[in-house]
Amino acid sequence: EKAKFEFWYGLSGDLGERVQDACKKFNDMQADYEIVCTSQNSYDTTLQNTIAAYRAKKQPAITQIYDAGTLDMMLSGAFVPAKKLMADNGYTIDWTNYFSGIANYYATAAGELNSFPFNSSTAMFYYNVDAFQKAGIDFKPETWEEVEEAARKLKAAGFDCPLGFNFDTWQMMEQFSAIHNQPIATQGNGYQGLDAELVFNKTKFVDHVKFFKKMVDEKLFVVKTKQLGMDIVPAFTSQTCQMIQTSIADHGTIGKTLPEGVKWEVAMLPVWKGTQRQNSLVGGASLWVMAGRPEGEYKGAAAFLNFLATPEMAQWWSTVTGYIPVTKTGFEAMKANGFYDKAPYKGRELAIASLTYTPTSQNTRGIRLGGFTQVRKEVSTALEAIFMQNADVQAELDQAADRSNAVLRRFEKTYAGQKLN
Amino acid sequence: MEKRAVFKSWWLPILFALPQILLILLFFYWPAIAVMKWAFTLEPPFGGVAEFVGLTNFDEVFADPFYWNSVAVSLIFALCGTCFTILIGLVLAIAVDRRLPGSGLFRFLYILPYAIAGPAAGMAFRFILSPERGLMASVNAAFPDFWNPAKYGAHALILVIVIFAWKWTGYTFIFLLAGLQSVPRSLTEAAAMDGAGPIRRAIDIQVPLLAPTLFFLLVIMMTEGFVGSDTFGIVHSTTGGGPNHGTEVMVFRIVDEAFKGLNYSGASAQSIVLIGLIMVFTFIQFRFIEKRVHYK
Amino acid sequence: MADIDIRAVRKSYGKTQTLHGVDLSFASGEFVVILGPSGCGKSTLLRMIAGLEEITAGEIAINGRVVNRLEPRERGCAMVFQNYALYPHMTVAQNIGYALKVAGVSRTERETRIEETAKIVGLSEYLARKPAALSGGQRQRVAMARAIIREPQVFLFDEPLSNLDAKLRVTMRAEIRKLHQRLSATSIFVTHDQIEAMTLADKLVVMNKGHVEQVGQPLDIYHRPASIFVASFIGSPAMNLFNTRVEVETASVRFGGVQVPIDPGLAASLRGRDVTIGIRPEQCAVSLDGSGVRATIDFVEELGSGRVAHAEIDGEPFAAVIGEHMSVRPGDRVGLELPSSQLHVFERDSGRRIDMKINSSSPHPAAATSTLAIVH
Amino acid sequence: MADIDIRAVRKSYGKTQTLHGVDLSFASGEFVVILGPSGCGKSTLLRMIAGLEEITAGEIAINGRVVNRLEPRERGCAMVFQNYALYPHMTVAQNIGYALKVAGVSRTERETRIEETAKIVGLSEYLARKPAALSGGQRQRVAMARAIIREPQVFLFDEPLSNLDAKLRVTMRAEIRKLHQRLSATSIFVTHDQIEAMTLADKLVVMNKGHVEQVGQPLDIYHRPASIFVASFIGSPAMNLFNTRVEVETASVRFGGVQVPIDPGLAASLRGRDVTIGIRPEQCAVSLDGSGVRATIDFVEELGSGRVAHAEIDGEPFAAVIGEHMSVRPGDRVGLELPSSQLHVFERDSGRRIDMKINSSSPHPAAATSTLAIVH
Amino acid sequence: MIQRTPIADALTYLLMVLGFFLLIGPFLVILAGASQTLQQINSVPFHFLPQDRFLENASAAWSRANLGSAMINSFIMACLVTVGKVALSACTAFAIVFFRTPLKHFFFWIVFITLMLPLEVRVVPTYAVAADLFQPFRLLISALTGIEVSVEWNLLNSYAGLTLPLIATATGTFLYRQFFMTLPNDLAEAARMDGSGPVRFFVDMLLPLSRTNMLALTTIMFVYGWNQYLWPLLMITDPAYKTTMMSLSALLPSENSLPDWNITLAGSLIIMAPPLVIVAVLQRWFVRGLVATEK
Ligand SMILES: Nc1ncnc2c1ncn2[C@@H]1O[C@H](COP(=O)(O)OP(=O)(O)OP(=O)(O)O)[C@@H](O)[C@H]1O
Ligand SMILES: Nc1ncnc2c1ncn2[C@@H]1O[C@H](COP(=O)(O)OP(=O)(O)OP(=O)(O)O)[C@@H](O)[C@H]1O
Ligand SMILES: O=P(O)(O)OC[C@H](O)CO
Ligand SMILES: [Mg+2]
Ligand SMILES: [Mg+2]
């Protein structure tokens, strides 16, 4: 009789199936445990269902929580810290082997990992080389000035949507702020205390949004959302839009979906000219082991996490998805065996490059804000108002910041007396 | 009307009512008490000790312009939904009540949309009224941006109201038709003898006599629009409350705030306000169900 | 004030025929009562005159003008419905004035006429009330006023009294009569109450199963019913009827073991035919000495105002009104005298009355022998 | 077969009292009719006997056993409801047999008894039908059968005939009487129809506004109504009543400008008191020569079996039955003779009858002078 | 009524046909779309004529959203809700209408207050209750006796959890109450005279007599149960219990692939079918039952 335990994850579609593959591999490989993997469709429903289930004492043993839910998890007291779990179950893990940029996001102040980095990513810039050539663009867009120029040329060459974007704040605000070394919130984006306040409405981000607004007015940048019928990735793969910013995780899917022979490239996110580029933030999600399960399940969970961390699995995972390897050795091994030189995978190493571009600063360590899902929603609503309904940029962002601060204050009050560890 | 109660046992009624009473206590009152508790504390998402904060949650709710926006959206949604369902239902009921050959078939067909789940209808209408394909694409081709619910809050609101009205018109239709048919034939005949033509009769005799039914439907549709299970489903499956809160009805906001925003306390406060509102509706309805504007 | 001609009118609902060819004509100003059992087609006929029901075949003419295809409002009829059909959401004044309002009569004129009409029916004080706040009799008057105000040529009443209690019916009957005298519009009044029929009618139409059984003056019909149906339907307690055969030799019929004499001429022409003989309970004399048909009293109904003795003769119930001071009790043997002049004779098969002279009110020429007529 | 005693029974619904102390006792096998206007408490009383209604105060005893706290099924009563209350989803047989089924009677016995009972009421051919497929009279019979099958000691009827048409009522009346003769259970029959009351009752109870007005044999009540209410309520056309004052000197009352003589002894004791005098329409003689009270005929109702002349005297309507051969027409001046022996005299204030001798059926001892009794 | 009003008749037909397109039109569009190819459905202008690809599209939808098990789950859920609701409401309404007890008004109000508060409004705490059904009793017991009991019963991911909270409302009870109130008093009294007690009366009279209402309620509740959206969405995490409404999102064209709305529409048609059939088949009783009581 195998010990069963549950694993909830937030990926769906192609990526979701890859998770199922991983689970199957684990189940096939050993005879002691059986992992039951359930997709909760998306990151936010996973967090939502995990919380509801935890309140009902029906939480899974392992759950996949995205970057934005990190602080919510950390203060919940509802999990078993990664390090403790592995130690308790007799696994030795070289914790220093994780890329520090990645580990920082999920670790305590003392640097101890609470959760296991699993599917890590960062935002990248994708562009259609064929279209660039057709429009006579002979440079790689590394700055926003160049992006604008490229957009104008593409427009002139008859492309209706030179750059497509949506209201996901991850690329637009979080990654932008990181690589431009702009704070999103005070207290080192929240790392130094629950009393952090959002300041994105006073940084370069505002100008950036204004720039986007201008581009949209000139029809150089185009809004592409699910509600409008097509999100950015399909817009890029259907060659409707020639430039997008999206996660490296989509690298695999884009490669598979774009018609054979179409030339495209991935690059680090552009910066404004004259900006000293900083490292970008790690995205994706990590695996949390939930507290309150029977002892037996933790053995299985530890075995599974250990299994995922093996170099073979790490490489397999990075191969079949676009996610980056999370350990230095993993990355080195893949680099060594020429993974990044071959056609479909070429360019993914840039994600690591972006993540590790500089040592982390106050503003690029990560984001440690409570209720960050809500903050994201406030900002993207503001963006929606700005781009769809012509609202004033500064006013909307100010309002979003105010509302987001209220969220932070409520969080602070809710966890009054708790210390960030 | 009080029924002449006939059986006298004291334990039998308790036995008969017990299963449902238990369910209701368990799944209605107990949760309702929990809502109360949460509304006056700051409930941590994962549970645990919650600090009592008095009316803070309510203050925050009332101070939030988007909350009032959701109240307004809910009101518009419920009011427009009610008006459309009742008006269209009334016109169709009057038409079918003329009993021309074939009207039986129409009667049969009109009720069918009632069977459809709001979310399923929402999905279908997302296609039917999509700006890029289906019907509206042609219109938009001629008049760019004539119809774009993803962009314009008003359009999105119209979209969800249309879906609601579509589903519920059959329901009001049936009640109104029955109401019309219970208007004694001799009254319309008397009016005919008095010289009134069909339209005149409809306006002077039939519609005024439908007043009780109309009122009943008004209350039912208002509550359905406010908190009916379709309301959430339609909004969730079509617009997700957007664009820019344009279709964020109260129920949607509550669920969103609780489960997405992890703000159980704020959501509970909103729930209580909503429950209070509905209680007022319920009260009105009960007063009128028992003694409606009966003429006789 | 209009005459009405109904010519070979038929009515079918789907396949079932409800009226089988009705011919009637009413003179201007006449008060016609249509009487008949439930379901015989009274309302149907009335509604066809009103224009509320399509005419399947035949013609209805008002004042000589065929109205078959006219809408109700174009026929100049006013109708008082059984349940009054008052508009519950309008006040009495609005109810009464509605027809004028539809006709576009000016507000001031309307008000004057409403007041006048209300005065006629004695409702002046109730003009502001809703029908729900009126008593049965008052409602009935509103219904009347609503009809009166239109100054119609024809008044149609569909059992307007049947929802009232006994006392009020008597009063309302008197009022309807007075009203008719005052307005003298042609009135057609449907009922299945014979007292109403007898007391109100200038002309009485008795219907049965979609046919007209008899038309005539009420007393005429009472005393000379044209058919077994009419005989049994009119009069209470009902006419005693018995089936027998005519014995020509003795000019008598056999009944209860006794020979009851009948008119010899009649007897001759009826030779051997099956007949039904009828006699009204108030026309047989009961005697204790036992002459006439012998019978044993079953029970005596004491009505206070009179007494009815019930017996069984030849296995059929028989009733006779007896004097107030005659003391009979159940079980007594009595004699019943059946005066030959009071006997009604009907042909068994057709149910038609057989008489010595041709009834002048018969719409059809008699189709019988010279001395014998079957009255239609 | 059970006697029933009702002792000081009261009924209140909340604060309003519906029965104000009713005392009645019925002998075993008696056929009692309770008569009264709508809302007077007839049904309430019946339902209290049946056990369907709590008894607020007082006692009801069946066969000497107080049943106040017994369940309906323990009282041995069967009831026939006004609208029959047939179980619409059961066949006639199931309806009739339901009580037996509940009582756990075996299937075979049940079937035999259902068949027997159905035969009694003539429903054998309809056993498989549902009530909806029956005519009014048949339904009524099912209701009867359902009561009969239980072989009850007491039969309770709550206006069982009021939903039937006139003809059927007469028939059903006779059937109920026959049934009573056959089963001779104590029967209590509630109605507000006087013909039913007069014809069916061994004992008649007249109720008004929660009081018993009079108890007695029907004819007794007709001829000696104990109160103005009973006088006006019983008899049709209703008794003529007029308010006047007694003139002792002439031993008469003044009416229509004429002095109508009354019993001098009575007159003496009534000195100067306000009285109401009543006379039945069939008891005043109308003469053309004009002796007696003078009146102008308003109209004459021809009922076929009789004629009623209507007039107005002292502003009040007055009716008199006239002979068949007397020719009076509206407008004629006639004289009305009011035979003093037929006059009913009532005390105006209390509404009670004033008589020379004490009425033996009165439940209370007379509380009046030696020669004068107010009958309760 | 004699009416020579061809204009009014024409207008009536016009209105009825307009109503037809308004109310049935969407079905026709769905039907047309569901039977077209990817190219056809994405063409502008839209072709309103149904094509022959329905079966292909339907089977594609069936497997994409795993409709097989979802349909079964939805069916089970709808049936349980229906049966539970019909049975419980009849019992409660009986208790409320046919007994004279001091608790009558208490029952009445306790039940009818729930009439207007659907699950959506109190979904958060209801979830918590469903997760630990005995919590109230445990609290009660420990409050009363100080003993900590540790029985738990979790309804998440179960049919009981899907249905019980939905059964706990008053719509059906209200319908029954209204119907019971219209029954003539005499009926119960006749039964009582015949010696029948309350339970017998309930079984022998009320249940058979309320057939129409039962069918009306069956229709309403089946539709209600089948169409539940939010509750399953929250409380079911185990794919084995997924209902059709939860499959809706899976039916939408996935983000990174073709806009194959033809598949989506075919799927939605499948999902709509069962309640549609129920309403169509039971509509006579549905209408009668509703109208006879609510009005
Ligand atoms: N709309 C209809 N469809 C079918 N049959 C009808 C319709 N209206 C009336 N009938 C039938 O026609 C016959 C005559 O009906 P009608 O209403 O004229 O009777 P009536 O003499 O007025 O009876 P009552 O005294 O009961 O009012 C009845 O048998 C009735 O069932
Ligand atoms: N349940 C009740 N609650 C309050 N009042 C009632 C109730 N039942 C009857 N009454 C009142 O008691 C009085 C007597 O009613 P009851 O039914 O006995 O009259 P009834 O003589 O049978 O009249 P009817 O001839 O109309 O049947 C009426 O005034 C009625 O309004
Ligand atoms: O798309 P992913 O998995 O790279 O995640 C993107 C963001 O980090 C989500 O918060
Ligand atoms: Mg009629
Ligand atoms: Mg009664």
Image (cartoon, coloured by chain):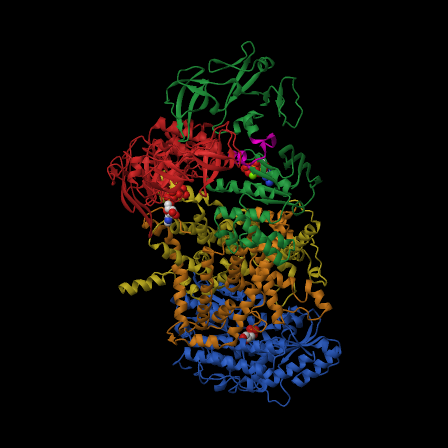
Chain colours: A blue, B orange, C green, D red, E yellow
Percent position of residue B102, x then y = 65, 47
Q: Residue furthest bottom?
A: A274
The image shows residue C197, relative to residue A294, as above or below, that is above
- Is residue C199 covered in magenta? yes
Horizontal arrangement in the rendering, residue A82 relative to residue B187 (left or right): left
The image shows residue C65, relative to residue E72, as above or below, that is above
Percent position of residue B118, x then y = 56, 60
Horizontal arrangement in the rendering, residue A204 relative to residue D57 (left or right): right
Q: From the image, which quarter does the C terminus of chain A lie in?
A: bottom left
Horizontal arrangement in the rendering, residue E121 relative to residue A335 (left or right): left
Percent position of residue E283, x then y = 55, 48
- Part of the protein shown in magenta: C191-218
Q: Residue furthest top?
A: C249
- Is residue A333 covered in magenta? no
Q: Is residue B137 visible?
A: yes
Image quadrant, ligand 1: top right
